[in-house]
Amino acid sequence: MTIRTAAAAFAMLGAAVIATPATAQETMRFMTGPQGGAWVPIAGALKNIWESAMPGLTVQTLPGAGVANVRGIGANRAQVAFGNSISTVDGIAGRAPFPEAVSNVCNIGSLYPQWFQVIALADSGINSIEDMRGRPIALQPRGNTAEVVTQHILQAAGMRYSDVRASFQSSYTDAVGLLRDGHAQVFTLGTTIPASAVMDLASARQMRIIDLSRYVDKMREINPGYQGAPLPANTYPQQEGTPTQITYTAHLITNCDRNPDQVYQMVKLLWDNVGTLRNIVAAMRDSTPATGGADIGVPMHPGAARFYQEAASR
């Protein structure tokens, strides 16, 4: 091959490389929740949806929890995460349990109501929060949303952790293990209904769902995002009536400075595939772009806002 021929071949190769740009590769860290809750399987479905439709994107799911996830997004340790409206609002405002305000955290869509539930062994004699005084209870690690709500429900009853024997467990599965073995008499959780962890306990022990109606007003004084709602009849085996539990909103968050076009595509894919998510979490059966774009006190990411505006105009 002559120098001139080689140069021509090299030029053609260079032109071909320029004409075929490489797909940008990105690993997106996705903070989820504790094992036994709904966030882990939803995250697995979203990972498959996003990776299949967005070339070059790899989604890495990581364990997390509502409060930790807000901190993770604010510190850019993750690029997308689940959040709970009550704790995300507290994080942006810099209220406890956050030592300071968290910035660069934006909403990309409300998913479904979360249910804070208090479950006791039937033979424990516990029928109220006050009855938990001096008893062993299992709950999430400090700083997780359901742990914070547990602090608030104790506060609403005029109590604190020093009034109970608290055992902080890394997962709802571990908490149920303590009750099943008789090492705890109550556990608290915040997730969808029916919660698999509660179903697991019902298959092993007689249990009681504590009615929280008397605490709703006090809870709303602590955080206006709390609501009280009757647990639908027959949500769980052994359930008696429709005991009131505490509700708030589960949503997705991302960095506010994230590429708006990418966030728009992620949100569009989420709602285009909402049927898949409903098969995983029945609580999403009534979820639509209209509910997803609702104002929950957290600023909406510009890319997500564009999707919800377009959806509303259709």
Image (cartoon, rainbow, N blue to C red):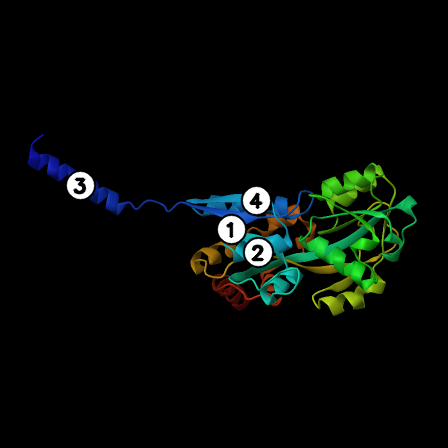
What x and y, as percent, mark residue 42?
A: 61, 47
Count residues near mark 4 (Cα–Cα under 10 Å), then give few for <14, some for 14-19, many for 20+. Answer: some
Which quarter of the image is occupied by the N terminus?
top left
> What residue would you read off at disc 1?
77
Q: Residue at x 41, y 44 (%)?
A: 56
Q: Could you tell me how far apart the alpha carbons at marks 4 and 2 are, in whole angstroms? A: 14 Å
Number of residue marks: 4
Asked if marks 1 and 3 touch (Cβ < 8 Å), the reply is: no
Q: Could you tell me how far apart the alpha carbons at marks 2 and 1 are, in whole angstroms? A: 8 Å
Whichever of callouts 4 and 3 sits on the residue coming sooner in the sequence is 3
234 sits left or right of 9 in the view: right
Residue 62 numbered mark, or none? 4
Whichever of callouts 2 and 1 sits on the residue coming sooner in the sequence is 2
> What residue would you read off at disc 2?
71
Asked if marks 2 and 1 touch (Cβ < 8 Å), the reply is: yes
The residue lying toward the viewer, choosing from 235 and 302, is 302
Instruction: Return the residue found at the far top.
Output: 1
Asked if marks 4 and 1 touch (Cβ < 8 Å), the reply is: no
Asked if marks 3 and 2 touch (Cβ < 8 Å), the reply is: no
> Disc 3 residue type?
Met
Whichever of callouts 4 and 2 sits on the residue coming sooner in the sequence is 4
Residue 12 numbered mark, or none? 3
Q: Could you tell me how far apart the alpha carbons at marks 3 and 2 are, in whole angstroms? A: 50 Å
- Residue 15 image-quadrant placement: top left
> Disc 1 residue type?
Arg
> Disc 2 residue type?
Arg
Asked if marks 4 and 3 touch (Cβ < 8 Å), the reply is: no
Q: Could you tell me how far apart the alpha carbons at marks 4 and 3 are, in whole angstroms? A: 45 Å
Q: Secondary structure at mark 4?
A: strand
Q: Residue at x 73, y 55 (%)?
A: 115
Q: Secondary structure at mark 3?
A: helix
Q: Could you tell me how far apart the alpha carbons at marks 4 and 1 are, in whole angstroms? A: 10 Å
